[in-house]
Amino acid sequence: MLRNRIEVKVQNAKCKVKNEERVEGFLSMTFPHYFHLFGQRIHPHLLMELVAYTGGFQLYLRFRKRWPRAVVPVEQNLWIIVGAIFGALFGSKLLAWAESAPEYWAHRFDPAAWMGGKTIVGGLLGGWIGVEIAKRVQGIRHSTGDAFVFPLILGMAVGRIGCFLTGLDDHTCGNPTQLPWGVNFGDGIPRHPAQLYDIVFLSLLGIALFVRSRRPYPNGRLFRLFLLGYVCWRLAVEFIKPRHTYLGFSSIQAACLTAAAWLVWERVSTPRQSLTLPVETEGKSVTTEGLNE
């Protein structure tokens, strides 16, 4: 009897050691993972956002040459950018408040808490709405979003690196998991690296859309395919992330469902349009038009 008890204790001790080694072996780094540049400690989110905005803008300048139909006069373009910025700011904050309402309510007397937090889905949808409002005011009837697709994908993917390196403080980690690629973000619990999932999906979506862009398509279709693909992805991946639910769905999922339904309805109800194919020849951009969808 004593021997059996000793063997059980030894086995339990071995299991405990294995589990501890496994947790430590998920990722040998600390979170947040700060960068040190020129003697200064820089927060990963700040640095990655700077890289995302800079890289995205440079890519936009490159790709806008391939979509001349998406280009508008400078003054109108400035108003579109203003609409995108304010729409994204408002949308990202509004959805963040709705997504984490109990936490914000608990700190309702702390202005700093209300200013913190934002969501990519809210920023994306808010920016889209802001652009559409600005276009309506300016009398712009054609789509201007195709030139923003790949800059957005790049910016979002780079931004997610910052989310990952920030760790638990960013509130974008997934639920606990026993999968071999689970990451210990500092609390000793292996979790889904949902930020890395986002990067992988955005990379695959970017490749698929680039291939699609080589064939004729109606102006604005590429942006809507991007938006539909991403909101459907977020609708699915949110199930493995901590969330407050209402009727089984989080606020982000409800926003994704609404956006997806609108995009599908818009696709079905929109009459056939002429197809365009961006082509670059000798440094100039032309479009192939006149084909029917």
Image (spheres, rainbow, N blue to C red):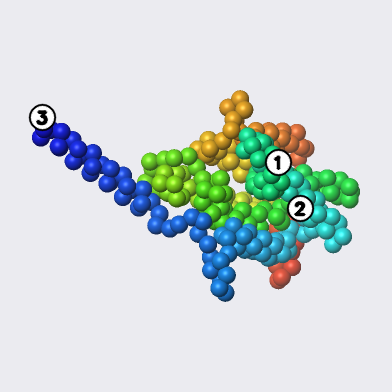
Q: Is residue 44 left or right of residue 134?
A: left
Give the quadrant of residue 79: bottom right
Front position among marks 3 and 1: 1
Amino acid at the residue labelled 2: Ile
Residue 109 circle label: 1
Q: Assign a secondary structure to mark 2.
A: helix
Q: Real-space Cα distance between discs 3 and 1?
A: 61 Å
Q: Assign a secondary structure to mark 3.
A: loop
Q: Real-space Cα distance between discs 3 and 2?
A: 72 Å
Residue at the front extreme of this rendering = 109
Residue at the top extreme of this rendering = 247
Residue 85 circle label: 2
Amino acid at the residue labelled 1: Phe
Crowding at label 1, few (<14), some or many (≥20) Cα neighbours within 10 Å?
few
Amino acid at the residue labelled 3: Met
Residue at 66% x, 46% y: name it: 113
Crowding at label 3, few (<14), some or many (≥20) Cα neighbours within 10 Å?
few
Q: Assign a secondary structure to mark 1.
A: loop
Crowding at label 2, few (<14), some or many (≥20) Cα neighbours within 10 Å?
some
Q: Which residue is mark 3?
A: 1
Q: Earlier in the sequence, mark 1 or mark 2?
A: 2
Residue at 77% x, 37% y: name it: 271
Residue 179 on image: x %, y %: 38, 43
Residue at the bottom extreme of this rendering = 38
Residue at 69% x, 44% y: name it: 110
Q: Quadrant of the N terminus?
A: top left
Q: Is residue 239 above or below residue 110?
A: above
